[in-house]
Image (spheres, rainbow, N blue to C red):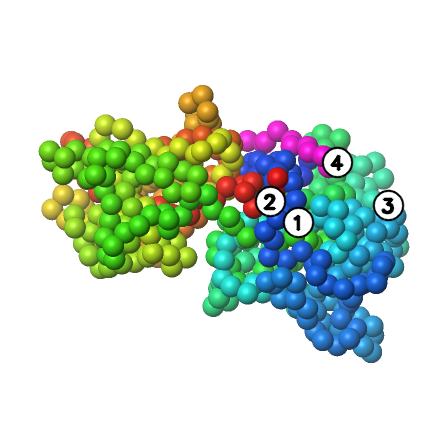
Amino acid sequence: MECTALRMGWVPRELRIADCGLRICLLALFVAGTANAALATFDGLTLPPESHWNGSDGSGEFTSGDVHFVNHYNADWDFWDGFAYSNCTDPNLIGLPAQYNAIAGGGQGGSANYGVVFVGWETLPTLTLSTLQVLSGLYVTNDCYAYYDMLHGSAFSKKFGGPAGKDEDWFKLTITGKDAAGQVTGTVDFYLADFRFADDTQDYILDSWAFVNLATLGEVKILQFQLDSSDKGPLGLNTPTYFCIDTIIPQSPIATFDNLTLAPESYWNGSDGSGGFASGDVHFVNHYNADWGFWDGFAYSNCTDPNLAGLPAQYNAITGAGQGGSANYGVVFVGWETLPTLTLSSPQVLSGLYVTNDSYTYYDMLRGSTFSKRFGGPAGKDADWFKLTITGLDAAGLVTGTVDFYLADFRFADSSQDYLLDSWAFVNLATLGEVKTLQFQLDSSDKGPLGLNTPTYFCIDTIVPCQSPVGK
C-alpha cells in the first residue's frame, strides 16, 4: 500500500523512500533539526572560500570525526573518484565545472563543508567507521552536475521525464553496510530523482538535504555507495554519477538496560514487588506472584551462559550477552493474563529495537522437550515458526499498527534457509508511527490444548528512536 507523501521544509516533492517506515523517520528527523552528535560533518576540514579538495595532493584519503574516507586521484589525467569535500555555494553552476557544488548551495543544516562522492568505474566509494556500530543515518543531496543534467538533459544524458515529462526515469543511490569481517549486513536504496509516479506532479529531482535511515543495516564498520539510473548507454550510466553527503549520525538509544545494577551472573524478575523498572526514557511493566514465585512481563539479566537449557535458562540470552556485547539485556515472558507492556516517557517515532531468542526457548525449538516439539520435526521438513508481534499504541491508547518478526522460521522451500535466531537482530518499528506504548505477543506453530507449547520468552535490548540523534 502506498504511503501518503511527506513534505517538510523546502523539499519540493515527495522523497520516495523504500518503505513507509523510512518516510516516517524522515519526517521526524526534519522536525527535530540539525545533528548534534554526528560522527562526521566535514566541518573540521580546512578549505579556502569557494574551493574543494579532490585528492590532488596524492594522500588518497581524509578523515572527518570518526570516519575515514577513501579517495583515488590520477595525476596524469587529473581524474578522481571516491570522496572529495567542498564548500562551494553556487547552486546554479552546470556541467563538469559543477561537480564540486551541492544543489542545496551549502552543507546540511547551513554548514559550510560537505562531502562530494563520485562513483567511478573501478572501485566503489568506501568509508570506514572507527568502531563497529549502528548508524541512525546520513544526509544526501544531488550534485549540481547530475542535477542539471537530469533537469535539462545534455549532450551525454537525457532530460528526466523526456520531452513530455512522461518517461519513468529514476536515479538511485544504494548504500551497502559491511561488518568488521567485511560481510554484507544489508542494503538501503534511496532515490535522488524519481519520475515513476502515476501523478506526474509528484515527480522530483532532489534539491535539498534529505536524511537516509541506515539503522536497518545493523552494526556496520564500512559503507559502500553505488548509483544506478534509468538513463544507460553502451558504456554504462549516462547520468553523471555524483552526489553529495553530509552529517553521519550514530544511533542514540533511549533504553539499553545498562543503567540497571546487578551482581555478576544474576537477574531481576520483580521479586521485590516493585511492579516494574525504568531504563533511560522507558518504563517496563513486571508482574510478580510471590505465592508461586511466578513472573511475567519484563525482567532483566546479565547471565552469560548460552548453553543452559530448560526452565533455568529463562534468564539467559542465546547470544550470551547484550546487544553490541553489553552486559545487561531485557528478558520478556508473555504470560496468560496481560501482554508485556513498555511505555515511553513521551510519544515519539521509534527507529526500532533489538531482539534475540531466550536460551530456554531456543533449545526447546532446537531439540524439542517433554512439552514442545523439535522445530522442523524429525526430518527437518515441518513448516514450524515462532513469531513476535509488536503493537504500537498512541497516547490515547489507540493502536497505530503492528510489526511481525520471526524468531524462528522453518517455512522455506529450501530447508537450508530455515533458522532459529541466535544473534541480536534489529526490528524496524518506524512504520508504527508516533507511539507512547508498545505491547508484545508471541505465536507459534507448536500449539496444544492450553495454548503454545513453545516457551513464550525472548530477549530485548537497545531501543532506538528516530529523532533522538539530532538536536532540537
Residue type beneath disc 3: His
185 to 55, vertically: above or below? above
| Of marks 4 and 2, the one in the foreground | 2
- Give the residue pinned by disc 2: 470
Q: CA distance from mark 1 to mark 3?
A: 25 Å
| Of marks 3 and 4, the one in the foreground | 4
Q: Position of residue 372 (x, y in %)?
A: 17, 44
Residue 420 vs residue 223, the one in the foreground = 223
Q: Is residue 314 visible?
A: yes
Q: Quadrant of residue 383?
A: top left
Q: Was residue 6 drawn as part of the magenta stretch in this picture? A: yes
Residue name at image x 43 percent, y 27 percent: 393
- Dot 3 crowding, Cα within 10 Å, few <14, some 14–19, many 20+: few
Residue name at image x 54 percent, y 42 percent: 468
Q: CA distance from mark 1 to mark 2?
A: 12 Å
Residue 10: mark in rendering: 4
Residue type beneath disc 4: Trp
Secondary structure beneath dot 1 equals strand
Residue name at image x 83 percent, y 36 percent: 164
Q: Which residues are magenta?
A: 1-12
Q: Are marks 1 and 2 in contact (CB under 8 Å)?
A: no
